[in-house]
Amino acid sequence: MDETGGMEDAALARLATEDEGAFEQLVSRYKDRVFRLCLSIVGDSGLAEDMAQEAFVRVHLNLARYDARHKFSAWLFRIAANVSATCLQRRRRERAVIALRPVVPLAAPDTQDRAALAVPALTQALAAIPERHRQVLTMRVCEGLTCREIGEILDMTPNAVSVAIYKAKQAIAEKMGAGHGMRRDPVAL
């Protein structure tokens, strides 16, 4: 274990402005979570890797501007979300239409078949909901962040985050429908 092994993120971020080893430790702590966030926004693992790397480059370049009164993870996730959203907007402008592979349900599927159909259907439903709803739902469900933390990252009130999460769940439930073995109750998602 090196000398930064047990440091809090804020102290490590301050040290990372001068010590590459400290910055590498921050990257190691957060690379998987940043990747998952980027993936939830851009929907492509290769592009998500690029966006995660770009987020860490921007963090490194702006470490001196980090305000230690706020959680480092919230600052990092906000940068990653912004980088990914900007990339997605750029790509949408470049492409007029994004074609999603349709899910063709089987006649009278059994439980395993229904579960197998639900994964691509869920992916398709997630891709079809508004970007902000996808972001808040991913941060809440996959990353386990609180509404307050998500609000800090996305510059929203905790109440607005709660509403966006509910609307995201509701939209996914409607898109998934009963044909994939999903209940229509958005709270159950």
Image (cartoon, grey):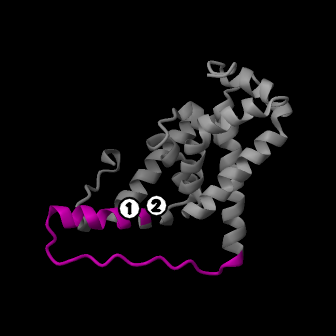
Q: Quarter holding the N terminus?
A: top right
In contact (CB < 8 Å): disc 2 and disc 1: yes
Q: Residues within 10 Å of mark 1 (few under 14, many from 20)?
A: some
Q: Amino acid at mark 2?
A: Leu
Instruction: Residue 137: give x, y in percent of width and height.
Output: 48, 47
Observer able to see residue 118: yes
Query: Compared with residue 139, is residue 7 higher up or lower down, i.e. above or below?
Result: above
Observer able to see residue 164: no
Q: Secondary structure at mark 2?
A: helix
Instruction: Residue 171: give x, y in percent of width and height.
Output: 42, 58
Residue at left 52%, top 54%? 134
Instruction: Residue 23: give x, y in percent of width and height.
Output: 74, 34
Judge left or right: residue 80 versus residue 102: right
How far is mark 2 from mark 1, CA to CA? 6 Å
Q: Which residues are magenta?
A: 94-123
Q: Which residue is mark 2?
A: 126
Query: Compared with residue 115, is residue 30 higher up or lower down, i.e. above or below?
Result: above
Residue at left 30%, top 63%? 118
Going by the picture, which residue comes out furthest to the front? 1
Q: Residues within 10 Å of mark 2 (few under 14, many from 20)?
A: many
Give the camera-side residue of 106 and 22: 22
Q: Secondary structure at mark 1?
A: helix
Give the camera-side residue of 5 and 133: 5
Query: Compared with residue 24, is residue 89 higher up or lower down, i.e. above or below?
Result: below
- Give the numbered dot on residue 122: 1
Q: Amino acid at mark 1?
A: Leu
